[in-house]
Amino acid sequence: MNERRALAVLAVASAALLAVRLFAARVVGFGDSEALYACYALHPSPAYLDHPGLVGIVARAIGGGSAPSPAAAHLATSIAATAAPWLAVAAARAAGAELRAAAIAGIVVAATPEIAIGLFAMTPDALLAPAWLVTIGAAAAALTARPASPRATAAFVVAGLAAGVAAASKVTGALLFPALAAAYAARAARPHARTVGPWAGLAMGAVVAAPVAVFEAGHGWPMLAHRFVATQAGAGISLSNLGALLGGQLLYLSPVVLFLAIAAAVDLVRHRGEDAVARLLFALFALPFAALAVLSLWSRVAEPHWLAPSLLALAIHAARRPKTSRAAPRVVAWAAGVALAMVAAVHAWILVPSAARLAPRSSDPRYDIANELFGWPQAIDAIREVVQEESGGAGDLVVVGPHWVVCAQVHAALGEGARIGCATPIEDDFDAWEPRAGWRDAEKILFVTDNRFAEDPAKAFPGRALARTQRVAILRGGRVARTFTISLWERAARAETRLDFGRTRR
């Protein structure tokens, strides 16, 4: 495959994936995590319990000063996801790869499910991945330029600023700083280390990320406590965690791409001292990978995509050292083909309603995460109807969910002004936005749940009686995918004569 054909393949793949993403943006809602990040837009802050605050700033910008709609958010992420493989091409070229090899690396990146599917969602990763790639490309460009030249200095500054953006997007991004420092201090980069450029870039990046650190320090490090203590019940290195980590890579990368990543990692380790760029790529791979792999082996709630940023350096290294054997092009073609087939299958499962009929009748729809993306508009309509009918005064009604995944969907849809309480078993961001001590004393509690949760509101709200209830059943492919229950709980004396069963929507 020559460079023109490689670029043409990447362009066609990008256009096809963009078309699918734009269609999906019209028909799917927020995933539960996306809804939480949309809530960040309603409560601006440098940091939250789960992540730094940049995703909330971006969400607020997309929403024009409020929570964005799913369609608007997914339009923005569709563009970002489509651009990511081209950033990989640019980074590979900056690192010295030939255009053909860089384009092939871009094809593999574009086809990888973690990129092709994962970056469609409005999450911190949609900001982290582009920032990480810009960091790689800019740092590589700086190290290949003449020391102290304007080109080198400017590239070091861009690399540092991009690292700051990555750290403000997700805690994982902070690992770029020690990795870059290690690469700059290496023997191969010593001529650059004696100049101001590398260190000025890191300092400017630290300024970008500083509001997160200052906020955390001033509030007793709540994000770190939440991530490493509150959510880590039963944590410890185990074989099950190892299995989840390895199995997740098979699904998130696809089997043949995982094979290519392992081959590239072995080759990078062997040639890490070849030049300053090789040392850079090794540092940007090995340091984050080691830290995140240990965390994933220890944490029961670790997610396979945590390793993803560290693997981006492998794609750039593979482009710098393209295989010359006859088998290599076939392996790359298989990698892209298998990955794209997995991507197509996931999109078909989500976007073709009748695909739900392929699931066995015995399967439990609660465990199909695709169901997160459908049904909430109907449930929100029912919730709004009750809120409008029952709100007799400012603040007398609060909407409560059993877990943040429900609370986030409701809050993102109802927007500013709505009181949303949350009964997540551990503390979450809703405890700051609507403290439990306040909403438990509200005149009326509208409890919203779905069939994923088994909480008994009669026990959760002692001293209250059920005033009205209704259910909203959501169908996919002719099957019930999710059932929402919306119940109004008032103080017992007021609710005695208002019970209204039997209102069910489909």
Image: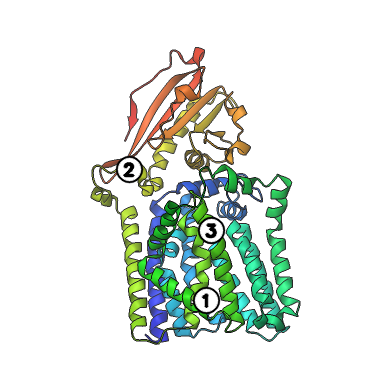
Task: Give the residue at x 69% y 49%.
Answer: 216
Left or right, 139 with respect to 69, comes to: right
Which of 151 and 342 lies nearest the eye of the viewer? 342
Q: Residue 193, which numbered label?
A: none
Using the image, determine if residue 262 lies above or below residue 495: below
Which quarter of the figure has residue 43?
Answer: top right
> Where residue 16 appears, x then y in whole percent?
37, 68
Tag 1: amino acid: Val
Using the image, determine if residue 279 lies above or below residue 239: below
Do residues under tags 1 and 2 come within 8 Å of each other at their CB atoms?
no
Give the Cα separation between the discs numbered 1 and 2. Answer: 44 Å
Q: Which element type, helix, strand or loop, lies under badge 1?
A: helix
Left or right, 452 with respect to 433, comes to: left
Mark 2: give few (<14), some (14-19) or many (20+) Cα within 10 Å: some
> Where residue 12 appears, x then y in whole percent?
38, 74
Using the image, determine if residue 181 lies above or below residue 321: above
Q: Residue 294, which numbered label?
A: 3
Image quarter where the N terminus lies is bottom left
Q: Earlier in the sequence, mark 3 or mark 1?
A: 1
Using the image, determine if residue 312 lies above or below residue 383: below
- For disc 2, the marked residue is 365
- For disc 1, the marked residue is 269
- Display colour scheme: rainbow
Which of 453 and 183 lies nearest the eye of the viewer? 183
Tag 3: amino acid: Val
Task: Give the residue at x 48% y 26%.
Answer: 389
Tag 2: amino acid: Pro
Left or right, 110 with respect to 334, comes to: right
Q: Earlier in the sequence, mark 3 or mark 2?
A: 3
Do residues under tags 3 and 1 come within 8 Å of each other at their CB atoms?
no
